Amino acid sequence: MKAPLGDVGRGRGRRALAAGLVAAALLLAACGGGGGDRGERTRTDSTCDGRIDGTAQVTVWFHAGPSAEYNTLRRQVQDFNRAQREVRVEVVTLPEQRPYNELVLSAAASGDLPDLLDFDGPRLYSHAWSGRIKPIDSCLSDGLRKDLLPSIRQQGTYAGRLYGIGTFDSGLGLYVRPSVLKKAGIRVPRGTEDAWTAREFTDILRTLRKAGYRYPLDMGLADAKPGEEWNTYGFAPVVWSAGGDLIDPRTFRTADGFLNGPESVEALTTLQNWVREGLVEPGRSEQAFVQERSVISWTGHWWYPDYTRKFPGDLAIVPLPDFGEGTVTGMGSWQWGVTSGDADGDAVWRFLAYLLNPDQIHRMSVANGAIPATHSAVKLSPEYAEGGAERLFIEQLTDGVARPRPRTPAYPAITEAFSRAFPKIMIDRAPVKATLDEAVEAIDKDLAAHDGYPKDGP
């Protein structure tokens, strides 16, 4: 899978650069039309009015090059175009991550955005605030809205309006081998209510090292490079679990006293101490768990296929440790948004509604291993059923354990600062408080430069 948010994926979640970048800059002009969902709508906007007049051409930007995910989307576009005549979809793939984000911002500045834009989940708030995308409440039927996982609705909402919608979500947890834990006398948590405490987890890592595992825990430090979204997605939950935050969650006007507060400092100091003790794979390889140097892997759903093939019948997924305020996990993945151009929202929604069909969601989740976005699509995957191997991911997304990254237009600055601080703390072993102070200074500088991101936009 292309990992959630900014591509949270460790190695195998990354995508090659798309071929034909020159062509990516050429957008087809959108023409009239409308259409899509014919059910009841919450009419809080005028993006969809239920009509498509004539034939509409819809351009779509997608963030990945050759991959199972891209191949699936390409086939979905072909099938959609063959199935009806009112809307013709043209998809353009662009490189993932920073090149993609930079191209999106450049296109927005020149007025060249496509009609339907693919973007990493928490970037929605910046896109919505700046007016690059428009709300889509008027496009959804009540039935579809209820069918969406609560995490999908949550991550797609800004200032009380739905601006984005994903066809899949993400899951984060600890992969363990029960046979090894049992032999070492270590209990296996049954769910989020009995997650290991941070202190208990520290003792577990020490026990496993004594049992012969050189680096008991793999935290994905091979992918913890400055600026990578994995750092924020994977480890902001540690800060939240301890009672800290990346920014003031009430006002979003400062990070001071939150990201560098005592709870955040203590939690990240605990992680740094694991590294100092040699309990963590130092980041030389992504294969520590598969190669059995580590027996616990702190990662996401995208590793499940490889891990279960390597350890059939001896793999379990348990919650992240509780650092004091309960276990917390990440959530969110790539979303679709209707841009604020001249294209008829109903025409764009017609295609997006097709992608949200349970069979099409299932089709994509099989290709990328992600968690289906709707309850009806989840039912098509036995892994997420009661007692299924990946059931924990569904429970976390529906029971409030999963938490979205800060829903503020300042998020790009927040993740940039945190994702640079994290490897300094974990790999360079820099002083935790001083490093977080630097991150806070960068975030607050961005907030000041944008006047705190006023609610009425730039």
Image: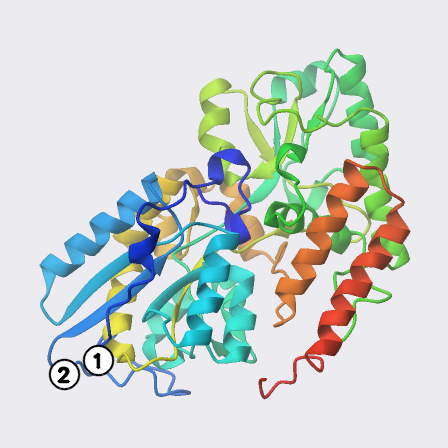
Q: Amino acid at mark 1?
A: Gly
Establish if 315 lies above or below 35.
above
Q: Quadrant of residue 398?
A: bottom right
For residue 381, say whether it is visible: no
Establish if 149 lies above or below 372.
below
For residue 277, say whether it is visible: yes
Residue bearing the label numbered 2: 53
The secondary structure type at the circle numbered 2 is: loop
Q: Is residue 100 left or right of residue 202?
A: left
Q: Residue furthest top?
A: 212
Provide residue 282's location: percent of width, then percent of height: 72, 27
* Label 1 crowd bin: few (<14), some (14–19), many (20+), radius 10 Å: many
Establish if 57 lies above or below 379.
below
Provide residue 230's location: percent of width, then percent of height: 61, 45
Q: Amino acid at mark 2?
A: Asp
**Can you say which quadrant of the picture contains the N terminus?**
top left
Residue shown at the point (41%, 56%) measured from the top left: 373
Residue shown at the point (60%, 50%) measured from the top left: 229
Q: Is residue 85 left or right of residue 69?
A: left
- Residues at marks 2 and 1 touching, judged by CB atoms closer than 8 Å: yes
Provide residue 90's location: percent of width, then percent of height: 22, 61
Which numbered disc, 2 or 1, marks the residue that appears first in the sequence? Answer: 1
Residue shown at the point (68%, 41%) measured from the top left: 320
Establish if 358 lies above or below 441.
above
The secondary structure type at the circle numbered 1 is: loop
Cα distance between the residues tagged 2 and 1: 6 Å
Residue bearing the label numbered 1: 34
Q: Is residue 274 left or right of residue 81?
A: right
Q: Which mark is residue 358?
A: none
Residue shown at the point (31%, 60%) measured from the top left: 356
Q: Quadrant of residue 200?
A: top right
**Can you say which quadrant of the picture contains the C terminus?**
bottom right
